[in-house]
Image (cartoon, rainbow, N blue to C red):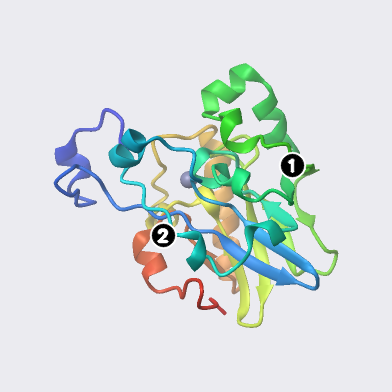
Amino acid sequence: MFGSVPKNLWGKRIEPDDENCIPLVTRSLWITYGDRRILVDCGMGELWSEPQRRIHAIRNIPEADWGFDPESVTDLILTHLHFDHAGGNELVPNATMVVQKREWQAAQDPETAAKVGFFRADFDHGHPVKQVEGEHDLFGDGSVICIPTYGHTPGHQSLKVRTEAGEIVITGDACYFCRTLRERRLPRFVYDREQMLASLDRLEALEKSGARLFFGHDPDFWKNVPQAPVPAF
Ligand SMILES: [Zn+2]
């Protein structure tokens, strides 16, 4: 996670356990809209060996607790194509995948894919792919809008959703933690630093306009959000 940064530096900010693991969460959002059943990101999936599960201390939520049938998903919106967001693609067989065109194209180019850390085995399970370009209102009524937040990866997107409790924005990895936004502290892995900083400005503007931001991997933030089977809103 922290590359070559020594533990005595990063350990001051995030306390590691005895195995030098730090807590990170990956969360998906389940949306119902008319007859559409929409999943936003789908976690790490199950294609992991036992040693990998042990090393990364992967604790997947059992399917019985998801609160929805994965076969019923019609639209699988991905913030980006990294394993911890698209690794569960194979568990959602009947959906159309919705990604930014530039993200999909980056994944088709072997050199870029290797540089960015895209692995076909994670995301490519034969789903129809809807490639959107920039800001895209999925249903044409402002209820679910793809917001380009490039930088973490070439075509990362966030998702603005209108709920009964107001607007929320799923930031994905455009903003791992709340303090990523507050302190403009970028993670070690950044595809394009300038674009990521511009994306943080954009997310901050959305927050100022009244939207509630959901921070991708922030365990403290998610402690206060009701999770399946309890509706968040
Ligand atoms: Zn991630």
Residue 106 at x, y = what percent?
67, 28
Secondary structure beneath label 2? helix
Q: Residue at x 61, y 42 (%)?
A: 150
| Left or right relative to 200: residue 136 | right
Which residue is rendered at x = 24% and y = 45% of the image?
A: 21
Q: Amino acid at mark 1?
A: His
The label on residue 180 is: none
> Which quadrant would the N terminus be assigned to in this image?
top left
Image position of 132 (left or right of 47): right
| Residue at x 53% of width, y 32% of height | 191
Q: Check disc 2 and give the amino acid type.
A: Cys
Q: Earlier in the sequence, mark 2 or mark 1?
A: 1
The residue lying toward the viewer, choosing from 59 and 25, is 59
Q: Position of residue 136 (x, y in %)?
A: 78, 54
The percent coordinates of residue 86 (x first, y second) are 58, 43
Q: Residue furthest bottom?
A: 164
| CA gap, disc 2 and disc 1 | 33 Å
Q: Foreground mark, 2 or 1?
A: 1
The single residue placed furthest to the right in the displayed view is 140
Q: Which residue is mark 2?
A: 178
